[in-house]
Image (cartoon, rainbow, N blue to C red):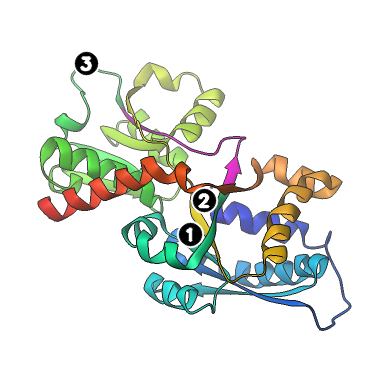
Amino acid sequence: MNIILKLILIIFLTSNIFANNQKKERKYNLVFGVAKKSSVLTKFEDANVAIKIWLDDIGSLYDADIDMFFYDNTAKLYEHFNENKVNVALFDLPYFFKYRKKIDLSKDTNWSILIDNEKFTHYYLIGKNDKKFNGFNDFKNKILSIKRDDEIAKIWLNKKSYEINKKKASKVLKLVKEESKDRTVLFNVFFGKADYAVIREKAWETIVSFNPAIKKRVKIIEKSNVKFLPFLGVVNKNTPSKAAKLFFQESVNLSKLEGGNKVLKALKFNRIYQLADEDLVELDKYYNDYFRLEKKYK
């Protein structure tokens, strides 16, 4: 399940916990901006209403009116963030690292989400359990399966292909099959509908735990060296420090509530956490290498 979609489900299911029907003028006015490229929100329009209701409820806990806007154009989100019209922004990672120097001038804090008690995630290239299938240098005339909305998976796939094949993966492969579910991505290989697939490590582990027989037909060929973030949020430097602090504080408090705790456990979402700039060094180098290769072999 997409990371942002998990958040939306949490927001929707916990809204009653924070319900406050008493409207009053509040001390802070905060604006959240979300790049649609960082999520699949465009497919779940009803969730937009749920998330706005929840933000109003959670805002009552620390005397803030909170609005959320969804941006088709990430450059416009940056523009509004830079102009202090957006207090908290969720950028898609390729855009963030491509324009990080500009974004850093306006931001104070980085943040992301803890999933399954892990800050980062890895990816696997999996393939048929046959010695003839050797991975990225064996893509010619092969079929690969990948999740449609997983941009990180696609970047890892293409970066490896640029490095090994000197071409974008789709220009080497016979076909790229894009699927909506992790299970379909994996089972395309299991049932012989694809030769290879790129899948998140956790998705692989979960699916295989329910069906260990998968390993008889499918093997892990390579694991990503880089540790990816699910997405990256930033807080504007002009956001009142007390409001920003409470944003993180309340995300932790969710797990202490009986109803909220059940939801968080069910969705494997633990909490929001802050990221130091030092935590982004590896990813910064990775994405800059990717942009260089993309330009070279475009």
Q: Which label is found at residue 2? A: 2
C-alpha separation, residue under disc 1 versus residue under disc 3: 37 Å
222 relative to 211 in the view: left or right: left
Is the residue 24 above or below the residue 101 in the image? below
Residue drawn at the location 55% of the way across and 56% of the way down? 4
Q: Amino acid at mark 3?
A: Lys
Is the residue 270 above or below the residue 249 in the image? above
**Residue under pointer 1:** 39
- The part of the chain drawn in magenta is 113-126
Q: Which label is found at residue 131? A: 3
Going from the N terminus, do you reach mark 1 or mark 2 first?
A: 2
C-alpha separation, residue under disc 1 versus residue under disc 2: 7 Å
In this view, the residue in front, 194 or 48, is: 48
Q: Nearer the viewer, mark 1 or mark 3?
A: 1
In this view, the residue in front, 77 or 199, is: 77
Going from the N terminus, do you reach mark 2 or mark 3 first?
A: 2
Q: Nearer the viewer, mark 2 or mark 3?
A: 2
219 relative to 26 in the view: left or right: left
